[in-house]
Image (cartoon, helix red, strand yellow):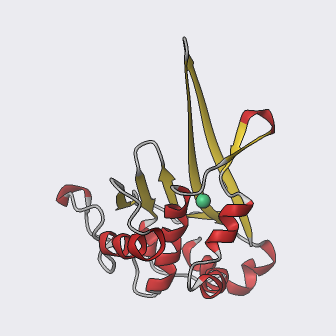
Amino acid sequence: MILLANVTTFLVTRSKAIKVVSTCSFLRIRQMAKQTKTKRKLAHPTLPMQGQLNLQHEGTHFDLRPIFDRLNERYFRGRLRGYKVMWGRRRKHRPREYFVFGTIQEEDRVIRINPLLDQPFVPLWFLQYVLYHEMLHSVVPDESVRGGRRRVHTEEFNRREREFRNYRRARRWEEENLSRFLR
Ligand SMILES: [Zn+2]
């Protein structure tokens, strides 16, 4: 399984102001060797309309808000303030090649979780892991690499990610179940 550091860096130069905004897309790429072995067909889940209710953190099976709050207390001493956590936009089709579990947009303090994770077969500790990953970005600084780009999944980040209580279990579950999120 490959963790792809997808770093988007915008360099906005207007007169004197230089603004750097880094975002993380936490995604995993299908491992080709496993494709045929573990691929499974799964019916498209039907999720309720969330936008209209303006309760974007509340899914059918999981409410992201209390999960975020508990993680914030446990791992970050409540340091993350003013963050919005919400289920992302639903897509018509599941992706073929890779699955984006979650994203963080630091500038707006918005964490989005893929709504395909709002299903009964997804363990709570796995969803916690995805959320923890995104939350960790807000406290672990990114690093500049050559060419003015930024790296968000630094060694320090990876080290702290392993501090998540169910890290190994979550990584194993992810490896075994990734194909269920893909076409
Ligand atoms: Zn990340």
State the image quarter where residue 40 is shown. Answer: bottom right
- The answer to whether 36 appears left or right of 83 in the picture is right
- Note whether 150 is above or below 114 in the view shown: above
* Residue 158 seen in the current view: yes
Q: In this image, 19 relative to 158: left or right?
A: left
The residue lying furthest to the left in this view is 53
Point out the quarter of the image occupied by ligand 1: bottom right
Compared to residue 20, the image places residue 139 above or below, namely: below
Q: Position of residue 171 (x, y in %)?
A: 65, 81
**Image label count:** 0
Residue at coordinates 78% horizontally, 72% vertically from top-left? 32
Give the residue displayed 41% in from the left and 69% down from the top.
72
Residue 60 point in image, percent of width and height: 29, 77
Q: Position of residue 27 (x, y in %)?
A: 62, 63
Q: Nearer the viewer, residue 127 or 176?
A: 127
> Is residue 29 among what the camera can see?
no
Which residue is at a point 72% across and 38% down the rendered structure image? 149
Can you say which quadrant of the picture contains the N terminus? bottom right
Say which residue appears at 68% left-offset and 58% top-offset: 153
Q: Quadrant of the C terminus?
A: bottom right
